Image: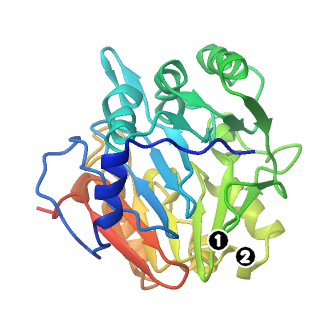
Amino acid sequence: MRRPIRRRGWQAAILGCIAIAASLACTRSPGETAPPAARMPGTLQITVFGLSRHGLAIAVETPSGALYFVDTGDKLGDSDTGKDTLAPFLRARGVDAIDGIVISHPHHDHFEGAAYLLKHFEVATFVDAGAEGALVDTEYLDLRKRAQKRAKGYRVVHAGDTLPWDPALEVTVLAPPIGGVRSSDDDRLNDNSVVLRIQHGDNVFLLPGDLEHEGSESLLATVPAETLRSTVLVAPHHGFFDEARFVDAVHPRTVVVSCLANYTNKKPRSPGDLAKRVFGAVGAEVYVTAEHGSVTVTSDGVRCAVRSQQEPR
């Protein structure tokens, strides 16, 4: 049985009285944690956090009030996504127990914030794809061992598995397949990201981690196009992605890109601009955390409302 999230009574009452507002923007500096966005009972709310460094962290608040994280950002020196962004988000909601953490793949910008959460909060389940081998950093192996001791449950998932997050949701693992995706060493961990499909009524959310060419081709070969079609997509690999066949198959209405404004050592330098071109070509509205800050999408099962932390400059 899932342990119910505990909230301080006065905070729960305040949050329950705030109405959902589409496209509400706050003028806040990049990296500053947004105040709690209201989640009306019965809605699904997914927040892609605006981070001060490259990384990805997503909160999933289910219709019944459970809370999960998919990826948790990075840690550098005294700066820690888990401590500086995710923990304040939880405390602002009066939450002291996390229903689960999913790590899409063992790259530092996706998993390092989880250590703080495991130390300071109760965590019911820890989920990953069980990656092993020379490409997996020992720091991640240590984190997984810690999770197996501290979390109440640890689970390895592959394509075809489901996650029992909420009776109102269908949460399906689309990738990686058992046996993995064949890819170069440089791309293998990305291409074997855990890909989650979350369906709430008519709305479908696709969370593909850092999927690249081989990973997206594997999905196209094994998953029906109608299953990939999504209402909301978190852009693969922080927007460094332009696989036209995948974009056409998913055909999202809304795309959220977690990235920095510019990368001096990468091409393209602005993945946000690339995502606007690539996904804009299929009619998607594109939100970029470097411009919008944290982006929250709320689903009532029929419609979606998008709320950003700040107005693009």
Q: Nearer the viewer, residue 205 or 169?
A: 169
State the quadrant of the C terminus.
Answer: bottom left
Q: Residue furthest right?
A: 179
Binning the other alpha carbons within 10 Å of mark 2 as few (below 14), some (14 to 19) or many (20 upward) gives few
Q: Nearer the viewer, residue 295 or 41?
A: 41
Q: Nearer the viewer, mark 1 or mark 2?
A: 1
Q: Secondary structure under badge 2? A: helix
Q: Nearer the viewer, residue 196 or 288?
A: 196
Taking 312 as reference, is 35 above or below it?
Answer: above
Looking at the image, residue 215 sits to the left or right of residue 77; the answer is right
Q: Amino acid at mark 2?
A: Thr
Taking 308 as reference, is 3 above or below it?
Answer: above
Q: Give the image location of residue 73, x and y in percent.
A: 44, 35
Residue in the image at 52% along x and 77% along y: 252
Location of mark 2 (residue): 227
Residue 271 in which image quadrant: bottom left
Location of mark 1 (residue): 199
Q: Which mark is residue 111?
A: none
Q: Secondary structure under badge 1? A: strand
Q: Give the image location of residue 226, x and y in percent.
A: 72, 82
Q: Give the image location of residue 254, x and y in percent.
A: 43, 74
Binning the other alpha carbons within 10 Å of mark 1 as few (below 14), some (14 to 19) or many (20 upward) gives many
Q: Nearer the viewer, residue 58 or 262?
A: 58
Residue 195 in which image quadrant: bottom right
Distance from disc 1 to disc 2, alpha carbons, whole Å, reads: 10 Å
Taking 169 as reference, is 150 above or below it?
Answer: above
State the quadrant of the N terminus.
Answer: top right
Q: Amino acid at mark 1?
A: Gln
Residue in the image at 53% along x and 35% along y: 97
